[in-house]
Image: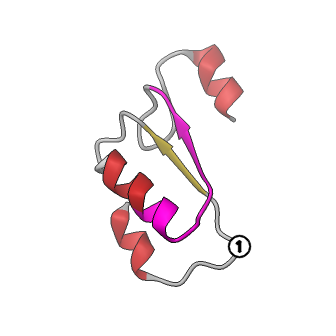
Amino acid sequence: MKYTYNFAHRDAIAFIGTSDPWSIVPEVQALSQKQQVPMYTYENANHSLETGDTLENLKIL
């Protein structure tokens, strides 16, 4: 969520799904890039990084 970026980040890493209903994904990606926080993005994954496809979920893990 974007509010996480209100705090200092040292040695941080981020993960987000493109179907995360709790986040505005492009906004969070932009904040991550601005603060130089590496971000991994997962297509069709929700806030829990689940996609509905068990094998894909295992790959994400």
User: Does dot 1 land on a helix, a strand or a loop?
Assistant: loop
Q: Amino acid at mark 1?
A: Asp
Q: Decide if residue 43 is on the left or right side of residue 40.
A: left
Left or right of residue 12, residue 17 in this image: left
Figure check: 24 above or below 33: above
In the displayed structure, would residue 1 be above or below residue 19? below
Per the image, is 2 magenta? Answer: no
Could you say which is closer to the camera, residue 7 or residue 50?
Answer: 7
Side (left or right) of 47 relative to 39: left
Query: Looking at the image, which is closer to me, 52 or 20?
Result: 20
Residue segment shown in magenta: 31-43
* Number of marks in picture: 1
Where does the N terminus fall, quadrant-wise? Answer: bottom left
User: Could you say where residue 22 lies in the image, as x and y percent from the top left?
Assistant: 30, 50
* Residue identifier under label 1: 11
Residue 38 x, y percent position in the rendering: 62, 57
Determine which quarter of the picture holds residue 40: top right
Which residue is drawn at the image coordinates 36% and 33% (left, top)?
19
- In which image quadrant can residue 2 be found? bottom left
Instruction: Name the residue nearer the viewer: 57 or 19.
Output: 19
Residue 25: image location, x then y, percent = 35, 46
Is 41 in the magenta?
A: yes
Quadrant including the C terminus: top right
At x 42% / y 43%, what residue is drawn?
Answer: 47
| Location of residue 45 with respect to 40 vertically, above or below | above
The residue lying furthest to the front in this view is: 34
Within 10 Å of the Cα at label 1, are there few (<14), some (14-19), or many (20+) other Cα atoms? few
Say which residue appears at 51% left-offset and 37% top-offset: 49
Q: Position of residue 8 (x, y in %)?
A: 53, 84
Q: Which scheme is used to colour this image of the protein?
A: secondary structure
